[in-house]
């Protein structure tokens, strides 16, 4: 082997549809399942859904259909959401998370069933955050203590964005603890994935190790927010006004920081970052109405048709399919 290939998938809620469209095009050009071309796959939040599905061998186009068909089940519209809040007031209080996790859990169980992390075909990293221990956690499909965990439960933990969903009570070993969205630590998991790749290779026999110079990183975003927060708003907002916007700010900051780190350590011609500004669709993580879903698909396809993306996709395919 003369290269070590990493696929990294950002968080972003329903905007994962954008990533899925791009991955479907990549798989179309590769003419084989994406999982056959990577030694490591990493995903956070909605990216953990994509990472796990691809690692199992689910076609990327099927994942596109999943977002289109199940998006409104995970993120129901205003009427359903308000009714749900009313029914949860007594159990969760008046400041309950925006969504009941039942829709998300139902969808994840339909996709992953009873499969466990150990059944993933490619070494896979899923990022979450343990709020009890106050530390980020990388669930590794190849680690013995994680292999028997149900995929859907780990993905649910990775997708539990604060204010949107309640934490996931996940039992690891003999301890059950609360986990939230991995985006609070690594919304773009690329830099962490490269670090893990280095660690994995350091344990290989010298003849089998792949040097960092030969790492290939394909990193897929979910579109970047373009809505500004004005100077007046940033000075006057308190806890209530910042409650939801601060999540987006933290996720965006984490995403850009990881991109910066990855660019410093991976060779320019081996780093492929697919990302675009969301100026033709809403950047909300939870807007799953038909109008916005169609807008997200349209924006993703428009980016695919751009000269820069076309050239980058072609170069990535050539890099992935090059014979050892």
Image (cartoon, rainbow, N blue to C red):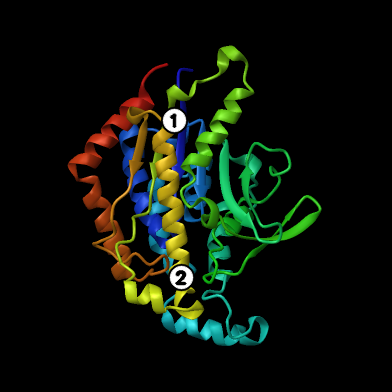
- The relative height of residue 100 versus residue 115 in the rendered view (above or below) is below
Residue 84 is drawn in which quadrant? Answer: bottom right
Residue 131 is drawn in which quadrant? Answer: bottom right
Q: Are marks 1 and 2 in contact (CB under 8 Å)?
A: no
Per the model, the C-alpha gap separating discs 1 and 2 is 32 Å
Residue at the farthest left position: 307
Where residue 261 appears, as percent x and y from the top left, is: 44, 40
Binning the other alpha carbons within 10 Å of mark 1 as few (below 14), some (14 to 19) or many (20 upward) gives some
Q: Residue at x 32, y 48 (%)?
A: 275
The residue identified by callout 2 is 75
* Residue 70 seen from this side: no
* Residue 256 seen from this side: yes
Q: Please state which of residues 77 and 7 is positioned toward the viewer in this rendering.
A: 7
Viewport quadrant of the C terminus = top left
Where residue 49 appears, as percent x and y from the top left, is: 50, 52
Q: Please state which of residues 137 and 112 is positioned toward the viewer in this rendering.
A: 137
Query: Which secondary structure lies at badge 1?
Result: helix
Relative to 128, is 75 on the left or the right? left
The residue identified by callout 1 is 37
Where residue 278 appears, as percent x and y from the top left, is: 29, 59
Query: Which secondary structure lies at badge 2?
Result: loop
- The relative height of residue 131 versus residue 10 in the rendered view (above or below) is below
- The relative height of residue 159 versus residue 72 in the rendered view (above or below) is above
Q: Residue at x 45, y 18 (%)?
A: 2
């Amino acid at each position: 082997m003369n290269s070590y290939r990493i696929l990294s998938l950002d968080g972003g809620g329903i905007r994962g549809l954008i990533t899925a469209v791009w991955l479907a095009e990549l798989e179309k050009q590769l003419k084989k399942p994406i999982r056959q071309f990577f030694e490591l796959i990493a995903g956070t939040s909605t990216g953990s859904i994509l990472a796990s599905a691809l690692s199992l061998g689910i076609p990327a186009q099927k994942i596109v259909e999943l977002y289109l068909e199940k998006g409104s089940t995970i993120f129901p519209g205003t009427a359903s959401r308000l009714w749900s809040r009313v029914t949860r007031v007594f159990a969760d209080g008046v400041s309950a998370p925006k969504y009941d996790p039942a829709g998300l859990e139902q969808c994840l169980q339909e996709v992953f069933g009873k499969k466990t992390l150990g059944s993933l075909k490619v070494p896979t990293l899923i990022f979450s955050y343990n709020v009890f221990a106050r530390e980020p956690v990388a669930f590794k499909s190849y680690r013995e203590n994680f292999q028997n965990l149900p995929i859907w439960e780990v993905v649910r933990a990775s997708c539990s964005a604060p204010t949107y969903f309640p934490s996931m009570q996940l039992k690891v070993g003999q301890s059950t603890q609360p986990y939230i969205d991995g985006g609070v630590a690594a919304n773009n998991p690329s830099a962490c994935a490269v670090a893990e790749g280095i660690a994995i290779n350091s344990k290989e026999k010298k003849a089998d190790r792949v040097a960092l110079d030969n790492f290939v990183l394909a990193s897929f975003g979910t579109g970047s927010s373009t809505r500004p927060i004005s100077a007046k708003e940033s000075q006057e907002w308190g806890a209530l006004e910042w409650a939801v916007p601060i999540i987006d700010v933290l996720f965006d900051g984490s995403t850009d920081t990881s991109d910066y780190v990855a660019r410093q350590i991976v060779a320019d011609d081996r780093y492929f970052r697919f990302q675009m500004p969301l100026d033709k669709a809403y950047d909300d993580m939870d807007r799953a109405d038909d109008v916005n879903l169609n807008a997200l698909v349209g924006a993703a396809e428009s980016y695919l048709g751009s000269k820069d993306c076309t050239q980058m996709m072609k170069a990535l395919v050539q890099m992935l399919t090059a014979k050892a």
